[in-house]
Amino acid sequence: MQQDIMNTMNDFGKNAFEAAKALGVINGKLVEKAIEQQLSVANLCVESGMQQVKLVQDSKDVKEYWTKQAALVEEYAAKMMDVAKDQVNLAQKAGEEYKSWLEKGVQQANVTAKAVTKKAV
């Protein structure tokens, strides 16, 4: 009986370790993609700033400046919207991966619990 208990505890430990490793992989991919997106936003901000400076230098009058400024704002707003869409897609994909990970863990726990119950009875 004690050997069965030890084997069961060992199985639980192995399953928990494998689940933790799988979660670590999911988290690692998510963090990597999130950092890539944040760098993309930072690059857009720097690029926008450089375009602003160029715009001020190249504009001949206030009307031309404001016309070009409006176009520039529109362009970067569209680019930021694309980044926001990518972030939403990333969040949805991460949610699906976490859900799958959790369902797999619950399924494994049920299998183990049933096996323990059979041995106990």
Image (cartoon, rainbow, N blue to C red):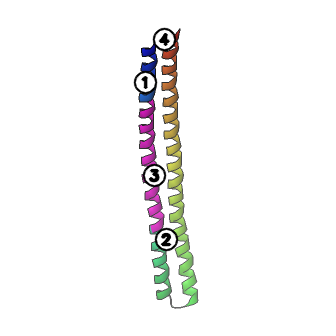
Towards the viewer: 88 or 11:
11
10 Å crowding of disc 2: few (<14), some (14-19), many (20+): some
* Residue that badge 1 annotates: 11
Tell me the element at label 3. Answer: helix
- Residue at the outermost top position: 121
Extent of the magenta region: 15-42
Instruction: Check the image and report above or below for 14 versus 66.
Output: above
Q: Earlier in the sequence, mark 2 or mark 4?
A: 2
10 Å crowding of disc 3: few (<14), some (14-19), many (20+): few
Instruction: Check the image and report above or below for 81 versus 49.
Output: above
Nearer to us of marks 3 and 4 is 4
Mark 1 is on which residue type? Asp
* Residue that badge 3 annotates: 31
Towards the viewer: 121 or 79:
121
Nearer to us of marks 2 and 1 is 1
Mark 2 is on which residue type? Cys
Mark 3 is on which residue type? Val
**Residue 46 on the magenta span:** no
Tell me the element at label 4. Answer: helix
Q: CA distance from mark 2 to mark 3?
A: 21 Å
Q: CA distance from mark 4 to mark 1?
A: 14 Å
Q: Image point 49% across, 50% down: which residue?
A: 90
Prevailing SS of the magenta stretch: helix
* Residue that badge 4 annotates: 119
10 Å crowding of disc 4: few (<14), some (14-19), many (20+): few
10 Å crowding of disc 1: few (<14), some (14-19), many (20+): few
Mark 4 is on which residue type? Lys
